[in-house]
Image (cartoon, rainbow, N blue to C red):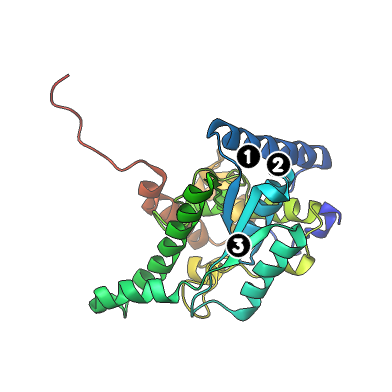
Amino acid sequence: MSSDLSVLPETAPLDLRLSEDELDATREHLVEFVQGVVDDASAEGAVIGLSGGIDSTTTAAVAVEALGAEGVHGLVMPSEVNTDENMSDAERVAELLDIEYDVIDINPIADAVFDAYPEATDDRMATGNVRVRVRGVLNYFVANHENRIVLGTGNRSEALTGYFTKYGDQAVDCNPIGNLYKQQVRQLAASFGLPEEIVMKTPSAEMWLGQTDEEEMGLDYDTLDAILALHVDGPLSKAATVRELGVDPAQVERVVDLYERSAHKRRMPPAPEPLYR
């Protein structure tokens, strides 16, 4: 499948796709990165949580190219808020890539947490984060047992907006696609020949029923990528970004707010400066 299948909507404000040479170099760079992390840890491979979405699917494809199918162990970890379609896609990806995988129902584990503190069970963000953190614990449980590293599946767009669970889906050893905007992840996925319906699937963290990333963030990924690239990562002012992209100023403000409010997620936990040296 050609990277050209990673199409952009006609309304996309900015095309961030890589050239063919850049895409080839990026793919090789990510493969070497995963190999290096595994070697540095003296590990025997990698564990990855498979959701059926584009990020985990693309990361798994990178890992297989880096480590071979035998070097990758997938975990499919459904809960009551995950759709059957996504879980089926997760298993289909594992079978397509020919990697070992296990299906672990996380409901009993999450329910034990909810039963321990029922006062919070009406808080869908809190309960959603519990499910994400349970998956992180299971990833490391398997990885420790098998002397493997845990691969994260976060991309640059999510990292800059804090669209991840602290000590959950970013409790990992590395993020192979962590420097790629969502547009570029789609392009990389297509270059691996991954199914187009997964490449173009509506992104969802599935923290609760019916949740989608773009609805929760308040804008689509193509617009988010463009604002991040030109204003947060780039040199343009807010006003210049609005003019360049033809977007609503409120959308730029929204992205800036997400970036600023999530700064703590991109840092080590703070500690006071020492009084004595």
Tell me the amino acid under the disc marked 1.
Val
- Measured in 3D between alpha carbons, the distance from the residue under mark 3 to the one under mark 1, in whole angstroms, is 17 Å
Q: Quadrant of the C terminus?
A: top left
- Measured in 3D between alpha carbons, the distance from the residue under mark 3 to the one under mark 2, in whole angstroms, is 17 Å
Residue drawn at (78%, 58%), measured in percent from left and top? 6
- Measured in 3D between alpha carbons, the distance from the residue under mark 2 to the one under mark 1, in whole angstroms, is 6 Å
Which residue is at the front of the view, 274 or 81? Answer: 81
Tell me the amino acid under the disc marked 2.
Ala
User: Which numbered disc, 3 or 2, marks the residue that appears first in the sequence?
Assistant: 3
Where is residue 166 drawn, in percent x and y?
39, 55
Q: Which residue is mark 1?
A: 34
Answer whether residue 5 is visible to the viewer in this image. Answer: yes
Q: Which residue is mark 2?
A: 66
Where residue 36 sits, quadrant-wise, is top right
Tell me the amino acid under the disc marked 3.
Leu
Which label is found at residue 112?
none
Where is residue 80 drawn, in percent x and y?
49, 80
